[in-house]
């Protein structure tokens, strides 16, 4: 994002932030139910990792506990996941276990699958899309970032009451 310490900004991120703000102005306001939780380790450890779905599961459990929301109340997952098979499989393995009540992958949207890789900026775009779905479904939507090697983020977005 554009800041005094980063004067060049990242325009895709600025645009996604604008989408979040625009949603709040048109009567379809949303709330970030939890600040993003993060798991970060060395990117080389990420290459060796075989338990990515379990890492996501533990991360999401913390997010849901903080928001006091049951996993069965989550309407869908929006993620920044692109085409890299390791991260797609990680997300789908988690989703198929966690979203059994919703039909697994049918309720998973991947932002970078069509937009291409743009680093952590994609998570902001996923947040904007999650806010759209949260308003439309009137239910919390889980937002996950797993596209950046060595970093996993999760947040819960929901409609305001």
Image: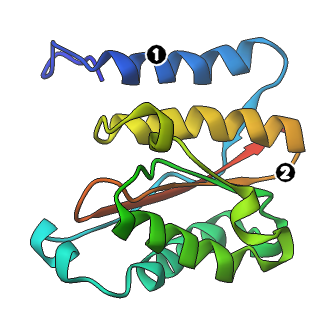
Q: Residue 76 in the image: state x and y as whole percent.
A: 74, 57
Observer-nearest of 105 and 9:
105
Quarter where residue 25 is shown: top right
Say which element carries label 2: loop
Say which element carries label 1: helix
What is the distance, in whole Å, between disc 1 and disc 2 at their CAs? 24 Å
Can you say whether 47 is above or below 74 in the image? below
Observer-nearest of 132 and 1:
132
The answer to whether residue 56 is visible is: yes
Residue 91 appears left or right of 28 = left
Q: Which mark, residue 139?
A: 2
Which residue is painted at 63% across and 35% down in the image?
129
Can you say whether 7 is above or below 117 in the image? above
Pointer 1 residue: 15
Q: Which mark, residue 119?
A: none
Q: Residue 85 in the image: state x and y as whole percent.
A: 37, 65
Q: Residue 151 in the image: state x and y as whole percent.
A: 29, 61
User: How many numbered callouts?
Assistant: 2
Residue 78 appears left or right of 119 = right
Can you say whether 38 is above or below 19 in the image? below
Q: Residues within 10 Å of mark 2 (few under 14, many from 20)?
A: some
Which residue is painted at 35% across and 70% down in the image?
86
Q: Residue 66 in the image: state x and y as whole percent.
A: 61, 68
Quarter where residue 61 is shown: bottom right
């Amino acid at each position: 994002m554009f800041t005094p310490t980063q004067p060049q900004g990242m325009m895709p991120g600025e645009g996604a932030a604008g989408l979040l703000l625009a949603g709040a102005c048109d009567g379809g306001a949303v709330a970030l139910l939890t600040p993003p939780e993060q798991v970060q380790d060395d990117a080389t450890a990420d290459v060796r990792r075989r338990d990515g779905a379990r890492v996501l599961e533990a991360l999401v459990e913390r997010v849901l506990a903080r928001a006091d929301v049951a996993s069965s109340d989550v309407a869908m997952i929006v993620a920044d996941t692109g085409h890299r098979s390791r991260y797609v499989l990680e997300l789908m393995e988690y989703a198929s276990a966690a979203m059994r009540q919703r039909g697994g992958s049918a309720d998973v949207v991947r932002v970078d699958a069509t937009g291409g890789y743009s680093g952590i900026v994609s998570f902001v775009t996923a947040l904007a899309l999650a806010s759209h779905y949260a308003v439309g479904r009137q239910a919390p939507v889980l937002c996950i970032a797993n596209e950046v090697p060595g970093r996993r983020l999760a947040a819960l977005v929901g409609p305001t009451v």
